[in-house]
Image (spheres, rainbow, N blue to C red):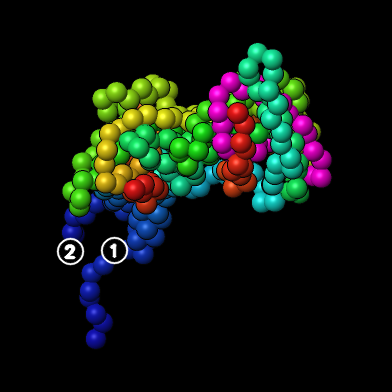
Amino acid sequence: MLSRRRGISPIIAYVLLVSFVLVMVPIVYQGLKSYVPQESLECPEGISVFVQDYSCEENEDGTYNLTLEIKNNGRFDVGGFLIHAGDGSSEVASEDLSSRIIEGGKILGGMVVFASGDDNPLGPGNMRKTVFNINQEIAKVDILPMRFQEKDGKKKIVICSNAGLKEDVACR
Amino acid sequence: MKRKALSPVIATVLLIAMVIVIGLIVFLFFKNLAGETITKFDGENIKLVCDDVAFSASYSSEILTISNIGNVPIYGFDLKLYTGKDYSTERLADISGVVWSGSGLNPGGVFSGNIGEHDKIQVIPVLLGTSESGEKVYVCDDAVGKELA
């Protein structure tokens, strides 16, 4: 005996299913597109600098010249660094020394860069001597290397937070 | 027997229209449920940006020092100030005596200020993002914060 069960025509069913999918796709896309992680600005693994040597010399006016020999012992070029000094009372150094540089680099927005423009001139194995004129007691410096990297066709400053170092520097 | 019915074409159009309308209703419902999306840096969800925040902090003799060692500008900080097991949450910029820049702590920037004596504090970064209704502040998850004793 033939069954007389009612149902939607297959063509209409197909049309409905396809329409449902077409409607849901943009809805889901809009809701989830912001969760797609974008390529973040970060330094490559293998960036490393260290203080090869330092010296502290008193000037006639009572200030001191702190000389730091920054050597690149990593695998990538470095464009400059951030430097903060502290008197040892706090674990995190808070005094920005970049504005006190007198030799070996230039100031750029709170950091020391080794060259004008957006180059990374300190190559692996190279050393740069930088001199800062200070007028306060410092016991340590926090140094964070930085480099210029290209993103979306533009050169951007990237701080290498995974390559920071703390150096005990007794000056004054 | 002549039974009246809709033409298949009209039925199809009606069904498609119903699907679209129901889909829009469901979308708007879940959109309101999920809340407004806040983004930063060309449309990236601000929750993901919180994972890229990097800062170091220390607390000694009532002085809190924070250094932004990452590449994400930090708009502010929420502090959980503990006295024993109890704590209160305050925005760093609102603490009496603290001088906080309106633009926040840019990459490479350092903040140092007296926040008073506490048994323990937890420092949680706050970011500024963009939403459909304009700029909005977003407090990162506690897991991104740092505990200082």
Q: Nearer the viewer, residue B133 or A79?
A: A79
Few, some or many residues within 10 Å of mark 2 (<14, 14–19, 20+): few
The image quarter in which residue B138 lies: top left
Most common secondary structure along the magenta stretch: strand
Residue A8 shows which numbered tag? 1
In terms of secondary structure, where does tag 2 sit? Answer: loop
In terms of secondary structure, where does tag 1 sit? Answer: loop
The image quarter in which residue B40 lies: top left
Q: Is B124 placed left or right of A145 in the picture?
A: left
Task: Tell me which residue sits at (26%, 41%) in the image.
Answer: B118
Task: Tell me which residue sits at (20%, 52%) in the image.
Answer: B85
- Measured as percent of width and height from the top left, residue A102 is found at 71, 20
In the picture as drawn, the residue positioned furthest to the top comes out as A61
Q: Nearer the viewer, mark 2 or mark 1?
A: 1
- Measured as percent of width and height from the top left, residue B114 is found at 33, 30
* Segment colored magenta: A124-148
Chain of the residue under label 2: B
- Measured as percent of width and height from the top left, residue B20 is found at 31, 45
Chain of the residue under label 1: A
Q: Is residue A142 magenta?
A: yes
What residue did someone put label 2 on? Answer: B1
Task: Tell me which residue sits at (53%, 39%) in the image.
Answer: B70
Q: Is residue A105 magenta?
A: no
Q: Is A122 placed left or right of B108 in the picture?
A: right
Task: Tell me which residue sits at (37%, 51%) in the image.
Answer: B143
Residue B57 shows which numbered tag? none
Q: Is A23 placed left or right of B81 in the picture?
A: right
Q: Can residue B28 be seen from the camera position used here?
A: no
Few, some or many residues within 10 Å of mark 1 (<14, 14–19, 20+): few
Q: Nearer the viewer, residue A74 or A94?
A: A94
What amino acid is at disc 1?
Ile
